Image: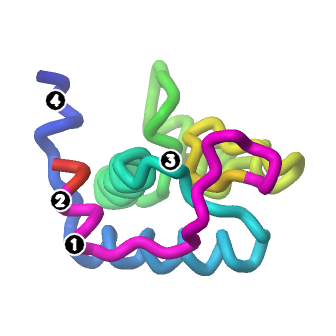
Amino acid sequence: MNPDQAVQPSPESLEALRKFAQTYAQRTGTYFCSDPGVTAVVLKGLATHKDQLGAPLCPCRHYDSKPAEAAQAFWNCPCVPMRERMECHCMLFLTEDNPFRGDSQTITTDTIQALAN
């Protein structure tokens, strides 16, 4: 098993990232993935990085040094490609034209816990 998979984020960080994601999706007119498991895993990864690194570093990329990348902030959520071009590598924030876009801009903590573990 990947060591990152065994790490659980703090309930506070998970709730903060859940609320952030919902607000950001509503503000930008984006939607979560049609598979809520994708949303759950990404939010768990962001919250884990927030606890470990002090920043919600994108969990869907490989980094030679996660602390260095978090400090640089380019891949901290929302990352620069998302802010500049509405491109979310993680499939957390999807635009209307994305075939994987669902209809929801909300997710519950219970759903995240059930699907990300």
Q: Which residue is mark 1?
A: 110
Per the image, label 2 sits on a secondary structure element best described as helix
Tag 2 near tag 1, CB within 8 Å: yes
Image quarter hosting the N terminus: top left
Q: CA distance from mark 3 to mark 4?
A: 17 Å
- Where is residue 3 shown, x and y percent of the image? 16, 29
* Residue at 50%, 47% in the rendered image: 57
Q: Does any portion of residue 115 appear in the rendered image?
A: yes
Does the residue at mark 3 contact the one at mark 2 (Cβ under 8 Å)? Answer: no
- Mark 4 neighbour density, 10 Å: few (under 14) some (14–19) many (20 or more): few
**Residue 53 visible (yes or no):** no
Residue type marked 1 = Asp
Residue 57's disc is 3
The span from disc 2 to disc 4 (Cα, nearest Å) is 19 Å
Q: Please determine whether, in this image, residue 42 is positioned above or below residue 113.
A: above
Report, in whole angstroms, how far the alpha carbon at label 3 lies from the one at label 2. Answer: 22 Å
Mark carried by residue 39: none
